[in-house]
């Protein structure tokens, strides 16, 4: 019986990982939103719990930040998770893409964010989509908590982008 349980557990860890997809649309009252999103030194101020930022070129940067682990997760020894990622920014017309790859707890993490900006009178309409691949971390922490982390981070980013000037 123990052998079968071990085999089932091993097989569950071998299942292919799914990308987590998040998307949304927000009205933003920031002037020159597209230029702001293309400039790492400007928008990095909106990354929650940013510890360090290294700008390598106008379209490449490395960010080190932490994600706070909620107490209700029941892991008293794990208060936050550190992540270090290398990002590349590209743009085409009114769309900015950020692709990041890095590590957390020794495990690979990937993210791709695409933001389309439509300028309106007095505001911009920001349509965004994020694909997140955190691999084994999803299984370790659980999809419910990963979704909560992701939505909290996106919410903080969008709020900051909307109000900072």
Image (cartoon, rainbow, N blue to C red):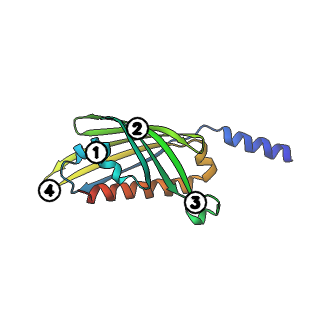
**Residue at horizontal 35%, vertical 48%?**
44
Q: Are marks 3 and 1 in contact (CB under 8 Å)?
A: no
**Residue at horizontal 63%, vertical 49%?**
140
Please tell me how crowded label 3 is: few (under 14), some (14-19), or many (20+) other residues with Cα within 10 Å. few
The x, y position of residue 147, in whole percent, is 50, 54
**Residue under circle 2?**
87
Secondary element at image label 4:
loop
Mark closest to the chain's N terminus, 4 or 1: 1
Q: Nearer the viewer, mark 3 or mark 1?
A: 3
The answer for how far apart the CA atoms under marks 3 and 1 are is 30 Å
The x, y position of residue 154, in whole percent, is 40, 54
Q: Nearer the viewer, mark 3 or mark 4?
A: 3
Task: Choose top left, top right, bottom left or bottom right for residue 6.
Answer: top right
Where 143 sits versus 91, above or below?
below
The answer for how far apart the CA atoms under marks 2 and 4 are is 30 Å
Secondary element at image label 2:
strand
Secondary element at image label 1:
helix
Mark closest to the chain's N terminus, 2 or 1: 1
Secondary element at image label 3:
loop
Q: Nearer the viewer, residue 102 or 55?
A: 55
Please tell me how crowded label 1 is: few (under 14), some (14-19), or many (20+) other residues with Cα within 10 Å. many
**Residue under circle 3?**
79
Task: Choose top left, top right, bottom left or bottom right for residue 91.
Answer: top left
The answer for how far apart the CA atoms under marks 2 and 1 are is 13 Å
The x, y position of residue 114, in whole percent, is 34, 41
The answer for how far apart the CA atoms under marks 4 and 1 are is 18 Å
**Residue under circle 1?**
37
Mark closest to the chain's N terminus, 2 or 3: 3
Mark closest to the chain's N terminus, 2 or 4: 2
Residue 1, label in figure:
none
**Residue under circle 4?**
122
């Amino acid at each position: 019986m123990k052998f079968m349980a071990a085999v089932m557990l091993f097989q569950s860890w071998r299942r292919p990982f799914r990308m987590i997809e998040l998307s949304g649309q927000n009205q933003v009252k920031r002037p020159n939103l597209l230029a702001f999103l293309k400039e790492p030194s400007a928008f990095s101020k909106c990354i929650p719990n940013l510890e360090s930022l290294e700008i390598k070129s106008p379209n490449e940067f490395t960010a080190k930040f932490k994600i706070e682990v909620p107490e209700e997760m029941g892991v008293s020894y794990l208060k936050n998770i550190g992540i270090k990622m290398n990002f590349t920014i590209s743009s085409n017309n009114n769309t900015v893409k950020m692709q990041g790859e890095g590590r957390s707890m020794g495990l690979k993490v990937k993210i791709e964010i695409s933001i389309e900006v439509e300028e309106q009178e007095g505001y911009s309409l920001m349509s965004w989509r994020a694909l997140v691949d955190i691999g084994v971390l999803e299984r370790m922490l659980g999809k419910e908590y990963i979704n909560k982390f992701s939505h909290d981070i996106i919410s903080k980013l969008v709020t900051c982008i909307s109000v900072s000037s």
